[in-house]
Image: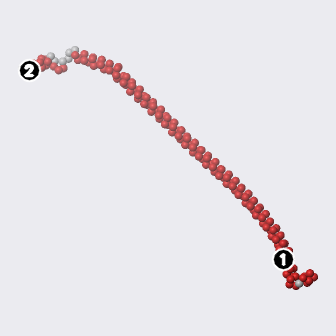
Amino acid sequence: MTHWITLLAVEEVAKEGGLFDLDATLPLMAIQFLILALILNATLYKPLGNAIDGRNEYIRSNQLEAQERLSKTEKLAQQYEQDLAGARRQAQTIVAEAQAEAQKIAGQKMAAAQQEAQAQREQAAGEIEQQKQQALASLETQVDALSRQMLEKLLGADLVNQR
């Protein structure tokens, strides 16, 4: 019997317009939906959209600043590398000049030392020659004395004195 009651209720609903009965409920529901959409838009969607837009703007500005800093950093690094290369070239030039100056000074000192050594050699050779002459003169007198002594012994003292 409950079956029949349900069937009768369905028939009555079907006679009134059925499932899509257009009475005051549909416009009221549409107005409620629009009011809910406006309230949600004002309280949730706009602040959320503003927060998202603000965050996107913040990210974009930070990204642009980071790119500017990166480009400045790259320019500074390139400038520092150029300065470093210039300083290295200048240091190499200074080192080369110092080496050339040191070689020049060493050459001058070497030449002076060679001249001094040559002068000392010549002085020593002169002293040796002088000592040689003195030694020869001394030997000559000794040879003469020894020769006389030998002659005296060989010939006798009288003959040598007569001469």
Look at 64% across and 48% down and name the residue there: 94
Q: In this rendering, does residue 46 appear at all? A: yes
**Measured along the vertical axis of the image, is residue 107 above or below residue 68?**
below
- Are discs 1 and 2 less than 8 Å apart at CB? no
Real-space Cα separation, disc 1 to disc 2, in angstroms:
177 Å
Q: Secondary structure at mark 1?
A: helix
- Determine which of the numbered discs, if any, sits on residue 2 in the image: 2
Image spot of residue 11 (x, y percent) = 11, 19
Provide the residue designation for mark 1.
143
Using residue 37 as the reference point, say whether residue 137 is left or right of it.
Answer: right
Q: Amino acid at mark 1?
A: Val
Residue 125 lies in what quarter of the image? bottom right
Q: Secondary structure at mark 2?
A: helix
Mark 1 / mark 2, whichever is N-terminal: 2
How many numbered marks appear?
2
Image spot of residue 136 (x, y percent) = 82, 72
Look at 69% across and 55% down and name the residue there: 106
Look at 84% across and 72% down and name the residue there: 138
